[in-house]
Image: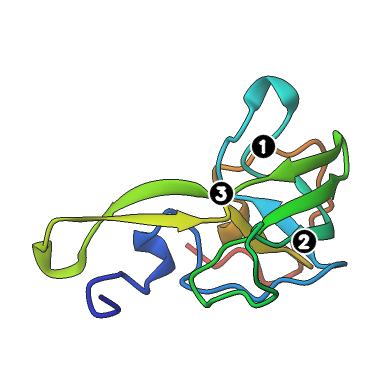
Amino acid sequence: MDKLVPKDINKTGGIPHGLEIFVGARVMLRYNVLVEGGLVNGAMGVITQIFRPNYRRDQMYDNDIPDLQIEFDRIGIHRLTPIAVKFPADKNKGTIERRMLSIVLCWACTVHKMQGCTVDKAVINLGSNLFADG
């Protein structure tokens, strides 16, 4: 299955193949979850709690995906649950449904990471080498 799942972030809707999360991690949403509530692509916040699946065991398996409580900068605290998204498999082998958290780590942002995002404000350093001759 790993050979069929694209590892290129450009082929997975901007979501990385794997993500190590922890309480205190700064994250950014990569999909519109609840537009009218402000949970939009580009909303940023900090993970405040990780909810383990409610099983009769203390251990999580590698494919278990927890819910997260995130305190967003502008819209307060919300619980984020995994979503299912379909992507084309590599080498035209059909489609793959992937359960995932629609977040990326976001301590800092590049122009490329922010493409298509909705932001309330931005601090931009264009520097002296941004534009080339011609």
Q: Do the numbered discs 1 and 2 sit on residues whose CB atoms are within 8 Å?
A: no
> Judging from the image, what secondary structure is the residue with disc 2 in?
strand
Instruction: Give the mark nearer the N terminus: 3 vs 2.
Output: 2
Q: Judge from the rendering whether residue 27 lies leftward or rightward of residue 63; answer left or right.
A: right
- Disc 2 residue type? Ile
Counting from the top left corner in percent of width and height, residue 11 is at 34, 61
Q: Which residue does the numbered mark 3 point to in the structure image?
A: 115
Residue nearest the observer in this picture, 17 or 65: 65
Q: Residue furthest top?
A: 36
Q: Do the numbered discs 3 and 2 sit on residues whose CB atoms are within 8 Å?
A: no
Counting from the top left corner in percent of width and height, residue 60 is at 61, 74
Q: Judge from the rendering whether residue 119 lies leftward or rightward of residue 8; answer left or right.
A: right
Q: Is residue 6 at least partly visible in the picture? A: yes
Q: What number is the disc on residue 50?
A: 2
Total labels: the figure holds 3
Marks 3 and 2 sit apart, C-alpha to C-alpha, by: 28 Å
Residue nearest the observer in this picture, 1 or 9: 1
Marks 3 and 1 sit apart, C-alpha to C-alpha, by: 9 Å
Point 31% across, 70% down: residue: 6
> Judging from the image, what secondary structure is the residue with disc 1 in?
loop
> Judging from the image, what secondary structure is the residue with disc 3 in?
loop
- Disc 3 residue type? Gln
Q: Which residue does the numbered mark 1 point to in the structure image?
A: 118
Q: Is residue 110 at least partly visible in the picture? A: no
- Disc 1 residue type? Thr
Counting from the top left corner in percent of width and height, residue 7 is at 37, 74
Point 65% across, 77% down: residue: 59
Marks 1 and 2 sit apart, C-alpha to C-alpha, by: 25 Å
Up/down of 25 relative to 72, above or below: below
Residue nearest the observer in this picture, 68 or 53: 53
**The N terminus - image quarter:** bottom left
Point 19% across, 68% down: residue: 90
